[in-house]
Amino acid sequence: MSVHLSSLAVIYKEKLRRPFLRQFLRFLRCLPRMLFRGRGGCSLKVMCGLTYRCPCSCAHCGMSGYEVSPADELSTGEVLRLIEDVSALPYGLILFSFFGGEPLLREDLPLLVAGAVKHGLFTEIETSGMNMTPEKILSLKRAGLNHVFISLDSAAEERHDSSRGIAGAYRSALSAIENCRRNGLPFSLSVCVTETSPDADIRDLIVLAKRHKAASVRLLFKADVAAHLRGGRYDLCEAETGAKNRLDRFLELNYVYAEYSGASTAAERKVCPALLKWFFYVSCYGEIQPCPYFPYNFGNVRESPLEKVVKRMWSNELFDCGSAECMTNSGEIKARMRGLSYPVLSRAK
């Protein structure tokens, strides 16, 4: 979710196309607001959930609580209009991330990537690597895709397949890694760390990433949005405190970093980028949220102009808390959530 220096480095290695340069200059104009964390907001990144469909059934998946309804997903035209609206926002946005579910299940993904590139946005996708064939990689590269996050939770095949709930997930991920490398498409490893993840396994994944010339390694944590949506407790990361506290030994400056902060030093890793207004999320049904795991939406792009909803969201008192942790783990934010007039996401299973 967060913006990391390794991602920005990939941007600077790209040829500065005119649309991208225009968008980058807009970002520079917004930089003072971002640095001083003003109420006006300054977003580096938007995540767009293209679908909640997925071939995997991950035990740690934070999106598993959402209803899968392909007929209600944003259409090609709606996503392209969203991209156009995103590029016009006065918030210095320069990254557009295609999220899921599994975004590769959208046949129009190359067209959507090309649309984002046309508007000067740096593009990336988040994928399990399932069915990421050389043909798909070439199609996405021709469309202008800049970067891929490939999920790999263990260097051991059996452990990764068990984590993903499907046989062959490990081999698919390795195949995607190798195909990206061979075709010159920059990629990073996305690793879900739990309290049961062996230290040796994490080290092996970092070695694997370097061997295959990955741009970076992102460590992330279990996110159970489903618990809250079903009326239970909603502690996004509290059960993973042990996993977080042992991260320090793995962080490497500008290579191995903690997902929810983009930080590669222990002192920085508890800053919530959503609270800093560095990104926001649009679901595959058009709902606008601070992040994919925050169980309230502030409006829908099918019903209201994007800029109007984002302004309304960022002017909410939630963003005045100054919390230095995940929004859903902050006691102050949880207390304020109870008084929100905005609906809990309606598409819970």
Image (cartoon, rainbow, N blue to C red):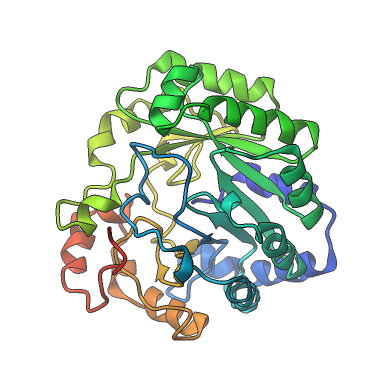
Question: Where's the C terminus, which quadrant?
Answer: bottom left
Could one spot residue 272 in this view of the protein?
yes
The image quarter containing residue 166 is top left
Note whether 280 is above or below 14 in the view shown: below
Instruction: Give me the residue at 45% from left, 86% from top.
Output: 304
Note whether 118 is above or below 58 in the view shown: below
Instruction: Give me the residue at 37% from left, 38% from top.
Output: 221
Note whether 227 is above or below 255 in the view shown: below
- Spot the residue most to the top: 200
User: Residue 165, image x and y in percent?
Assistant: 40, 32
User: Residue 147, image x and y in percent?
Assistant: 68, 46
User: Residue 205, image x and y in percent?
Assistant: 53, 22
User: Residue 170, image x and y in percent?
Assistant: 53, 26
The image quarter containing residue 127 is top right
Q: Nearer the viewer, residue 36 or 41?
A: 41
- Spot the residue most to the front: 71
Q: Nearer the viewer, residue 212 or 253?
A: 212
Instruction: Give me the residue at 84% from left, 62% from top.
Output: 17
Instruction: Give me the residue at 46% from left, 72% from top.
Output: 286
Note whether 306 is above or below 270 in the view shown: below
Q: How many marks?
A: 0
Could one spot residue 214 in this view of the protein?
no
